[in-house]
Amino acid sequence: MTSKFFLTVCSGVCLLVAACSPSQKISITKANSLKEAYKNNFLIGAALNTSQIQEHDSVADNIIKQHFSAATPENIMKAEIIHPAWDTYNFDLADKLVAYGAKNNIKINAHTLIWHSQLPSFIRGIKSADSIKLYMENHINTVAARYNGKVYSWDVVNEALNEDGTLRNSVFLQKLGPDYIVEAFRLAQKAAPDTKLYYNDYNIEQPKKRAGTIEIIKKIKAAGVRIDGVGIQGHWHMNDAPLDKIEESIKEFSALGIEVMFTELDLSVLPNPRGRNNSADIAATTAYNESINPYKNGMPDSVQQKLAKSYEQLFQLFLKYKKNVTRVTFWGVDDGQSWLNDFPVRGRTNYALLFDRKLQPKKAFYSLIDLKNN
Ligand code: G3I
């Protein structure tokens, strides 16, 4: 029997119609959109940069609307941008993002309230604990309250841990002591009662850091304060995403009765000059040399395949725990946007995401679509 196939694409759904003899006509509906493919499992998100929030590029804009049910601002809700001076707040881009989310049915995960990095420069001039406390209160009361119920969720505290699971020696720990995390969640709960509240960090699938995270979550709960979920960032390498540790983390975090999310997923394909240390600590950079930028003229097909396979294995695991995993967010839409082009080495050409620099879907994209269609 010979069959002809017609492919129709409409609003993210492919209709594959096999035209055989009239009696054999069949119709198979296939998702051609990430958010459609995974809609019964978890939200699919992307980090958006300023240009994407401002809808400068219509091709990127169409991709965002077609494929993503969630979005995280890559930078514009961080303290240095949204709260640049003691009494000054800059809400323009965040307001725009919130309106964009509402219009396009995209849930916004706001990022982030309390983080040691990208703090406004005035913080460096603050010497007293009372003033840091007041900064934290003002910041959360103003920013979280403004977007209460308008953003779906907040990364309330970001990256508070060292690799060994102890608390990072941030300005907040130094001035306020270890209870600052509980206090941040307490303030956020009051300011944003209609928004979900999360703790977010990298490498927390690793046993020691995972234990530190569990301690934080238990402490927040023991204080009678609300925490709704934990975000495992997911900045990994395509050769060694730690699947067993990720699985163990999903189990242990879910056992605490909270949502588990993968919040900043990307898979580097480039050599890591620092060995297997997949830190996302932006202070840890290395000098450029040609040997660690092997694909500057294009990614070989073998690497393309490997990246696709690695994404597929991760999503197989996420699907296994679809009852516990509520969102998977990629840290960017396309390879050109990725922070990994400049970290841990400036000026390289990385290929960590699902869409290439021309905004075309890569093999990795199709592998994730096929995982749901087959
Ligand atoms: O805003 C300036 C701009 O004025 C200037 O022209 C430009 C020149 O380089 O720099 C711009 O600031 C950059 C900013 O991104 C916006 O593009 C900073 O230099 C750069 O350091 C900053 O990098 C961001 C990084 O966080 C900083 O911490 C990355 O885009 C962003 O992807 C990254 O995201 C973090 C998450 O928030 C937390 N988890 C780790 C993740 C990756 O580092």
Image (cartoon, rainbow, N blue to C red):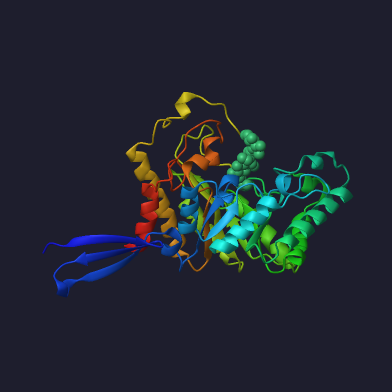
Q: Is residue 294 left or right of residue 80?
A: left
Quadrant containing the N terminus in the rendered view: bottom left
Foreground: 60 or 127? 60
Q: Quadrant of ligand 1?
A: top right
Query: In which quarter of the view is residue 108 placed?
Result: bottom right
Q: Residue furthest left?
A: 1
Q: Residue at x 35, y 36 (%)?
A: 300
Residue 56, above or below 16? above
Residue 56 point in image, percent of width and height: 54, 46
Quadrant containing the C terminus in the rendered view: bottom left
Foreground: 160 or 206? 160
Q: Residue at x 75, y 69 (%)?
A: 224
Residue 43, above or below 344? below
Residue 56 appears anywhere in the view: yes
Residue 352 point in image, percent of width and height: 47, 43
Residue 111 appears anywhere in the view: no
Residue 11 point in image, percent of width and height: 41, 63
Q: Residue at x 72, y 49 (%)?
A: 82
